[in-house]
Amino acid sequence: MRTRTDDTARVVVIGAGMAGARLAARVPGVTVIGEEAHAPYNRVLLAEVLAGRYEPDVIALPPAEVRRGVRAVRIDRAERRVLCDDGSVVGYEHLVLATGSNPVLPPLRGLGHTLPDGVHPFRTLDDCLALRAVARPGVRAVVIGGGLLGVSAARALAECGAQVVLAQQGEHLMERQLDAEAAGMLRGHLEALGVEVHTECRVRGLRCTDGDTPAVRAVEMADGYELEAEITVLACGVRPRTGLAQAAGLEVRKGIVVDDELRTSDPYVHAVGDCAEHDGTVYGLAGAALEQADVLAEVLAGRPARYRGTRALTRLTLRSPAATAATTGVTVASGTSGGLDLAAFGDSRPMPGDDVVRLADATRGAYRTVVVRGDRLAGGVLFGDLAAVGSLARTWQDDDPIPADMSLLHLLTNDGGF
C-alpha cells in the first residue's frame, strides 16, 4: 500500500472515546484518529442501549471531526508522526494517547483468541449491539463478573426478557464500591428482576460445540456444576491499552505513566483516560477521563493547569421490577415497587479508628452509610434514597473537614432523614 503523508497537525489524538472526544471539543483544530466506525458515544449509557431504552444515536457525544475506522499502528517519535493501517501518515506537534482499555478475557478452558459464538465482551457499542441482537425473551444468558459492568449487563439482559445468571467470584456484588449490606440489597433487587445471582463461585471454563465455528453451550464452574448458556457475557474488568506506547518506548507500568500535566516520558506526547496512569493510579472511570481531558485542554492552550487526581462518584440506576415486566412481558418475582438508585464514593471499608454512621429503612429499601476518618469523609454508600448524595459527595470531593460541632448522624439526616 502506498504511503500518504498528511499535513502536520498541531494536536493529534489517538482514540475517539469519551476522553478523546472531550479534548476535541475543547481544543480547536484537533485531528482525532478513531478505530471504531461509530461516532464518539457515551459508554456509560451502553446498558441503556442494551436494554432497548435508548437507540445508539441518543448516546452520541457532541459532533467532533474524527477519522473513523482508522487504526494507528506505529508512533515515530523521532519524526513526530503517526502511521495508520490505511497507509496514511499524520504528523503532529503534540500527540495525545487516548487509547482506552480492553476487556479482560479470563483464562477459561474453551476460551481462545477467537471467541466462540455466543460469547460477548461488553465494552464497546459494537459489543452492545451484538448482544442486543441475540438477547431475545427466554434466551439463557450467563454474565461472568459481578462488578459495576456485570451488574449493568445482567440488569439490561433481564429487561430484555433473558433468563440471566450472574456469577461473581467474590463474596458480594460490586466489591470495589459496596459494603456487604448494600450489596445484599442490590442482590435482592436483581433477583426481583429475575436474575439468578451466584457469589463466591469460580468459573472454570466454557463448554462449546465442536466444529469450525464452536458455539457456547454451558459455563462450567470449579465445583463441577454447569450453567446452561446460549449467551455468555464477559464482564471481568478492563486493562489499559498500552501497546502503541510500549512499542514507541514510552514509560508504561500498569498504564502509560503521566505527570500532573498528563505528559508522558516524551514531552511531546500526553495520555488521558483509561490508558493513563497518574501517581500510580489507573482510574478506568469516565469521570476521571473527562477531568483529565479538561486539564490537558488547558495545558495545550498554554494556560497553567495541573491534574491532581479524581475523586469519583459511582452511580447506578436500577429500574423497578414492575416497569421491567410491563416493557418485556416477563413475570418477575415480587420485590421493591419502585426503581432504585445507588451511589458510592471513596473508601466505604472502615479502618481501625474510623467512625461509621449507618441508617437503614428496610420498609422503603433505603440504606446509607458513611465512613469518617479523622475530621473528613473517607467514603460512603447510599442505596435506594439519594436525597443526601449531593451534599455528601461535595463534602467528600472537596475534601472539606467536617465541623467539630456537627453530629455525625447529621451527615445522613440533613435532608430531613428518610
Image (cartoon, grey):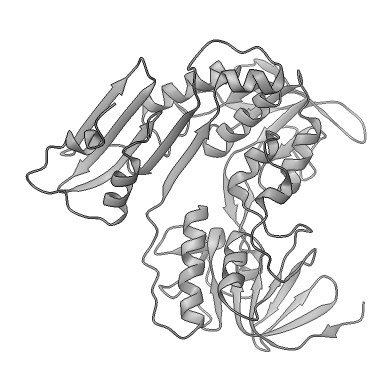
Image height of 196 relative to 106, above or below? above
| Rendered location of residue 295, percent (x, y) | 45, 71
| Rendered location of residue 407, percent (x, y) | 12, 37
Outermost residue on the front side: it is 416
Quadrant of image for the C terminus: top left
Residue 314 lies in quadrant: top left
| Rendered location of residue 338, percent (x, y) | 49, 22
Q: Depth check: 349 or 16 in front?
A: 16
Image height of 23 relative to 37, above or below? below
Q: Residue at x 31, y 38 (%)?
A: 388
Q: Residue at x 36, y 24 (%)?
A: 366
Quadrant of image for the N terminus: bottom right
Image height of 51 relative to 100, above or below? above
Using residue 315 as the reference point, say whether residue 366 is left or right of it. left
Using residue 286 as the reference point, say whether residue 182 is left or right of it. left
Q: Residue at x 57, y 10 (%)?
A: 333
Residue 275 lies in quadrant: bottom right
- Asked if residue 264 can be seen in this view, the reply is no
How many numbered circles does the render carry? 0
- Asked if residue 397 can be seen in this view, the reply is yes
Q: Depth check: 228 or 396 in front?
A: 396
Q: Depth check: 177 or 315 in front?
A: 315
| Rendered location of residue 155, percent (x, y) | 60, 28
Outermost residue on the left side: it is 405
